Amino acid sequence: MKKEKGLKNRKYVIVGNSIAGVSCIEGIREIDSDGEIYVFSDEEYFNYSRPLISYYLEGRLKENQLNFKEIDFYKKNRINLFLKTKCEKIDLDRKILYTTSGNFEFNYIFLGTGGKPILPKIEGIENTEKGTFTFTKLNDAKKLKKYFEEKEIKKVVILGGGLIGLKCAEGFLGKGISLTVIELSDKILPNTFDSLASEIIENKLKENNCEIIKENTIEKIISKNGILKEIVLKDGKKISLDVLVIAIGVFPNTDLIEGTKVEKNKGIIVDEYMRTNFPFVFAGGDVAETYEFEGIKTVIPIWPRASKQGKIAGINMAGGDKKYEGMFIMNSVDFIGISTISFGITNPKNEKDYEILKKVDYEKRIYRKIVIKENRIVGAIFLGDIERAGIICGLIRNKVDIHLIKKFLIDDKFGLLILPESYRKHIVKGEGIEV
Amino acid sequence: MVKKILIREEYCIGCRLCEVFCITEHSKTKDIIKTFKGNEPRPVSGIYFEEVGYISFAIQCRHCQDPPCVESCLTGAMYKNRKTGAILYNKEKCVGCWMCVMVCPLGVIKVDLKNKKVASKCDLCIESGFPACVKNCPNEAIILVDEKGERIEE
Ligand SMILES: Cc1cc2nc3c(=O)[nH]c(=O)nc-3n(C[C@H](O)[C@H](O)[C@H](O)COP(=O)(O)OP(=O)(O)OC[C@H]3O[C@@H](n4cnc5c(N)ncnc54)[C@H](O)[C@@H]3O)c2cc1C
């Protein structure tokens, strides 16, 4: 990767100082050690890992344990960091970024503005000033914590039984609070799990006194003097409550490019170099729509993707040449002490087009499922026992033909030795070394 | 300089000495008897040993150039040492999110589910400077090479 000739002393601006933005810094500095880099965040923290806010809510981690890069990272990389600074407008003709801390000229800009929580249109939602929360930022977790300290909270309802909703719910367990999760689908974690895996987690939640209401949603929110009082569900059921957390998902935050000619669909559209339709405008992470695994064009809001895309964007902005190869949805989440890992298609609609291998131990709450299509693994669930799950990740990514090793995939002997020899040698040898 | 441990599975005789010496090297006393017979907590081996029928083989972290575990780590605990290229991790920072376990195609990161920490991962024996598994493999099934693939002996 060589630095492109022509531009010396490049000026880079990076909007968003989360994992995509930080990885972009690393990408740029891999190639260009002199260019000026300006980083902007509308949050006040020098960085923190968003997925850890539930650990903070729970009390497992303190505020000063949430950062994923040390403060000297910015000094070492000679970053001009602007916190509490909102980027308001980009002038694409003159290449100027307008922010609340002044205007900045640039040669290259990276948009790592992430996602925004989706707020449903519920009658009365605009009138609740106190008691209704979202849960995607550290300040959300802080506000929630403070509300609990100031008020006597007896009843909490969480709208959304996906990853964020359940991680938030976990923060309230065992605190003597009555807790309900409301999910529109017929099972919790509908996007990543099948019914059995969902059921195992659901039962564990219920054992911990968390009520789960499925195939239902909130139709009306009733407040008194701005303070949340009661919700009415679609089926007419009424619940009095003190706190409502809305966690039905996130949506790409494309505010900054509204009114510009930067192309977007659901997210900002970028090519495999993370470049938008403007050659000096790059994007990556939860805001970016890319070609993913198997050529599917989409936004997958997960940490490793933001990390990878930010880095690749940085390398290319600095004149390098690196392509993004696409990812599939995957996650590793611990729910109330049950570790889970899921990959790709876990719950195919037309089951007959797939081959499914399963191993279940109800007592121990251990479950493994492998979804196969045309002799390739396309999805998997590991629950309770996640050891060596990454081998499956590799088999999916490398589209390895598994027809000879099928019977070992859910066997106790599952490991590298059962893999086709050529593939095993390929991954074992690593970069450039013969085995 | 980036060193690499090579696995030559056709030479592995399944003696598991690599595991024994890996554990010893990462123990407090680094004394084999005290590690196995004393009452200090015994570390977990950084090596995965596998055996199916007559074939056996031991493997540890490959210290990838583009490490997916580092890329996926939610806390910044997993990192790449810029000088040596070794992939190391900071136990203090680790919260046991298992993103690294999810993405490692070799499945060589061991977990401690109870304490929510990565239990062990090969660190190339940074302290002593020469990998204990290489040093103690009786049949040269595990060897150390430099960037060019030239063999390094202690
Ligand atoms: C509770 C929770 C748990 C999660 N758990 C997991 C998990 O277990 N595994 C996983 O893979 N993923 C998880 N995720 C998702 C993961 O956090 C995201 O995929 C990741 O943070 C995306 O990174 P990003 O840099 O693209 O965007 P973000 O992290 O959303 O950061 C964008 C940043 O840009 C700032 N910004 C936006 N607009 C502007 C502007 N105009 N001016 C200045 N600054 C601006 C924002 O304030 C924010 O700081 C979780 C998310 C949440 C909320």
Image (cartoon, helix red, strand yellow):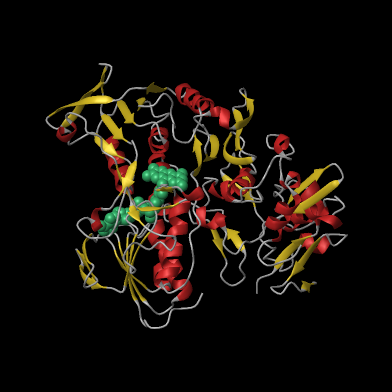
The residue drawn where x is 33% and y is 30% is A158
Quadrant of residue B126 in the image?
bottom right
Q: Is residue B21 left or right of residue B70?
A: right
Depth check, front residue: A328 or A136: A328
Residue A395: x and y in percent read 63, 47
Residue farthest along the top direction in this orientation:
A236
The residue drawn where x is 23% and y is 33% is A131
Residue A145: x and y in percent read 31, 40
In the depicted structure, whether residue A157 falls above or below residue A340: above
Q: In this view, does A148 lie to the left or right of A62?
A: left
In the depicted structure, whether residue A53 falls above or below residue A260: above
The reply to whether residue A256 is in sight is: yes
The residue drawn where x is 70% and y is 55% is B60
Q: In which quarter of the image is the C terminus of chain A?
A: bottom right
In the depicted structure, whether residue A96 falls above or below residue A294: below
Residue A418: x and y in percent read 75, 44
Depth check, front residue: A399 or A123: A399
The residue drawn where x is 52% and y is 56% is B77
